[in-house]
Amino acid sequence: MNIQDLHLKENPFEYLTPIQGEVINWAGMKDLKQNIENVYINSFNRNPRNVVLNWGPLGGGKTYAAFYFKNYIVSGTEKSQIINLYTRTPQEGTKVTEQVFKDILDSITYRKLKEYIQDSYRELGEKQLFEFIYEKINSEEFAQAVVNLGKEENIFNIHIFDLMKKYMFNNISKQELNSLKLVRTLDSDSDYRKFLSGILLAVTASSKPKRVFLWIDEMEDLIGYTSKQYKEFSQILRDLADTVGERFSLFMNFTFSDSEQENVRIIVGEALWSRINHFNYFNIFNLEQAVEYVRDLINFSQIDNSKGTYFPFEEDVITKLLKSLKPTDLIPREINRNINDILQFALEQEKVKIDNDVYRLWFNSKNQY
């Protein structure tokens, strides 16, 4: 037997950890989804600067939300107007600003980076693009470096983008640097912050509004940083929020319980905390919310929904299973773990419907040792 024999196109509970690029459906948590959608929508309608704190238990859906919204499009906008970026907090705090810089560029991809900035260069022209960036970052050197990324490659600018990639990775010779009309490389944390801010300004510098939405996951890893390191990490986020302004929205994912909010405040620092204007708590489900979450996932995958809303399950089996879990386990990861387990059990037992008899066999098999 396979999963299709249970009238499911695929097993929606199979993955305990979401896979980037494969998250296309949202289950349960409708209020949270609406809150995040509002940030996207208002970014275009009201032009606010957004700093969003998402926090909750491990396995509560924060990473899932980041992957789901990577493909989100605001009604009335085009895909090219929304630049969704995802990165994780660097595991080590050494050279953290440089690492965040590289991680964000990796998330944009160099192919898209070239495309975005060339579009702005063509629309505004070199002088206006330079002045727009310089006014925000207050550095002629790095404003010129960003402008270089948008120059068309021709007989006078052969391989200019390739040279700029070497520049960004500090792998450029003095002669090559001179050919770019630059006098120094990226050396300090301040250099990386200014250059990165300039890049994000350039990719959004078009008459048709563009917005950058940066999701930073696993920010609880900051606990392992020294005080100096997490202040440095906080500084780059503050600079991006302040410099790129209304064109930029930051989502910070923390794994902490509701009672530990003060710990988050201490870690991010008062300056960044004061800029947060949206708080989303990924709470542990109550029973009704857990049932809704399971039902939505089943409905997304059903081959034939005429067999019933919960098929291949009987509805009371779902309720019994969820009631058997510890209250703290009513979160997406643990629910997926248990529903996947009983689905696999049903397949092994060649049962095409999961009723109370199947549930009883499964439950006893789990608790016999």
Image (cartoon, rainbow, N blue to C red):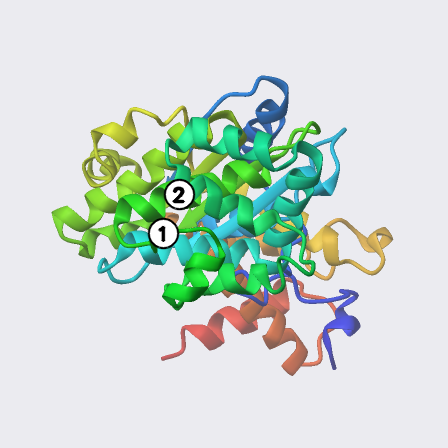
**Quadrant hosting residue 175:** bottom left
Does residue 210 sit above or below 323 in this rendering? above
Graded by Cα atoms within 10 Å as few (under 14), some (14 to 19) or many (20 or more), the crowding at tag 2 reads some
Residue at 26 percent of width and 35 percent of height: 261
Graded by Cα atoms within 10 Å as few (under 14), some (14 to 19) or many (20 or more), the crowding at tag 1 reads few
Residue 340 in the figure: left or right of residue 330: right
Callout 1, which amino acid? Val
Residue 141's mark? 2
Task: From the viewer's side, name the closer residue of 107 and 253.
Answer: 107
**Quadrant hosting residue 303:** bottom right
Task: From the viewer's side, name the closer residue of 91 and 263.
Answer: 91
Outermost residue, top side: 46
Q: Position of residue 216 (x, y in %)?
A: 42, 48
The C terminus sits in image quarter: bottom left
Residue that label 1 marks: 183
For the residues bearing labels 1 and 2, Cβ distance under 8 angstroms: yes
User: Can residue 196 be seen from the camera position used here?
Assistant: yes
The secondary element bearing badge 1 is classed as loop
Q: Nearer the viewer, mark 1 or mark 2?
A: 1
Residue at 45 percent of width and 74 percent of height: 366
Residue 338's mark? none
Does residue 186 sit above or below 349 in this rendering? above
Distance in Å between CA atoms under marks 1 and 2: 8 Å
The N terminus sits in image quarter: bottom right
Task: From the viewer's side, name the closer residue of 70 and 15.
Answer: 70
Does residue 179 sit above or below 288 in this rendering? below
Residue 322 in the figure: left or right of residue 128: left
Q: Position of residue 27 (x, y in %)?
A: 62, 46
